[in-house]
Image (tube, rainbow, N blue to C red):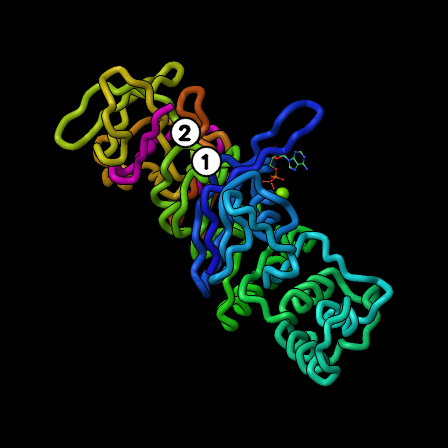
Amino acid sequence: MLKVENLYKQYRTDAGTVEALKGITFEVQTGEIYTLLGPSGCGKSTTLRSVAGLETASSGEITIGNLTVFSGTRGINLQPERRGVGMVFQSYAIWPHMTVYQNVAFPLVRGNRNVPKAEVKERVLNALSLVQLEGMADRPSPMLSGGQQQRVALARALVYEPKLLLLGEPLSNLDAKLRVEMRTEIQRIIKRLGLTGLYVTHDQEEAMAISDRIAVMQDGIIQQEASPGEIYADPVNAFVAGFIGKSSFLEGTVARIDDGLVHIDVRVESSPFTLSCRRDAAPEGIRMGEVLNIMIRPEDILVGDPDTAAAGANVFHAMVKSSTFTGGRSSCELMAGDVCILAELHGQRILAEGERIKVGVPVERLKAFAL
Ligand SMILES: Nc1ncnc2c1ncn2[C@@H]1O[C@H](COP(=O)(O)OP(=O)(O)O)[C@@H](O)[C@H]1O
Ligand SMILES: [Mg+2]
């Protein structure tokens, strides 16, 4: 179990103070994979490094299991090796002059640790089998592929039998196919060993695939924390919506509120139209004339008759800017006036570029955010 409470971090630089973390709080349960997701500079690495003990936060508290490893107020700051964490980072940090075995054994034999030789052997071989590198123990490290090197790094993180595994963009240096393979493997190992996993990535697809819960970060704060499904279906603001999955945004003015619906006049060039969403899919306390940002997910777009009938009143006209058939579905860009809307069409008609079409979005699929 990991608990991070009200973590702040200021970096002092020649150019002034950088507020990297502005009150980060979260808890990760045993057996859970929790991912910090966000654009470059949002504070993911600073958070991860603070948990590892490689960075000293300015204030706040970090608890691993029953052990307080950092407390600003109580002046506690344990050394990284006393925190009982395993770490895997983007750069594998595999020592090239050592064999696979020596690399993995390193955490057990460095300094004056007195782990008996037989136990070292047992634990190293065990860790190697966990990452499916049995039989590779004597291989010189430079003779490994990128994927195998990352497996060695993972085995080395696991050999100390940590309760908490910290993973900082561990797949960034791998090609697309290996990335998918390794993330499944990391997930399997964390679940099987009952570890607690803190994962950092800027890749939303990777985050969705590996995580039990995701925290979307921006500028040193957590904007939303939820399961992948919840965060996709119900983002709290336009930043989260834009960062998770694909979506298009349309600006409009609140024209009417009735019967549990909000009707919004969309201001696109040449052909204005009105879209309606459910009252609870719009911000609280909105007023007439307020400008909102309407989000449309590509898979919620319906095209042509009779499909658009399901959309009720939410129908408008658009021109097909591009249409790419990718087998079983097509990805399209639709122009509504001067605004481009992405559409992902399944089993619907393949559209021709330049075609003018009727577009529908079901009322219950729309969300509107404050600007
Ligand atoms: N050693 C440092 N000195 C000064 N500023 C830093 C340092 N490390 C990170 N920062 C700044 O702190 C903020 C958060 O950085 P970081 O945690 O690395 O973000 P991320 O990992 O999400 O890209 C950024 O504005 C970054 O420029
Ligand atoms: Mg980083």
Q: Residue furthest front?
A: 74
Q: What is the three-letter code of the residue carrying label 2?
A: Phe
- Residue designated by label 1: 242
Q: Is residue 367 magenta?
A: yes
Extent of the magenta region: 348-371
In the structure shown, which secondary structural element does the residue marked by tag 1 occupy?
helix
Q: Is residue 4 visible to us here?
A: yes
Q: Residue at x 84, y 70 (%)?
A: 140
Mark earlier in primary sequence (2, 1): 1
Q: Say which quadrant the C terminus sits in.
A: top left
Q: Give the vertical position of 36 relative to 305 (above or below).
A: below
> Residue 129, how many percent across, how many down?
65, 77
Q: Which mark is on residue 249?
A: 2
Q: Residue at x 33, y 33 (%)?
A: 359
> Residue 131, how many percent across, how many down?
64, 71
Q: Residue at x 72, y 85 (%)?
A: 118
Q: Residue at x 50, y 73 (%)?
A: 192
In the structure shown, which secondary structural element does the residue marked by tag 2 occupy?
strand
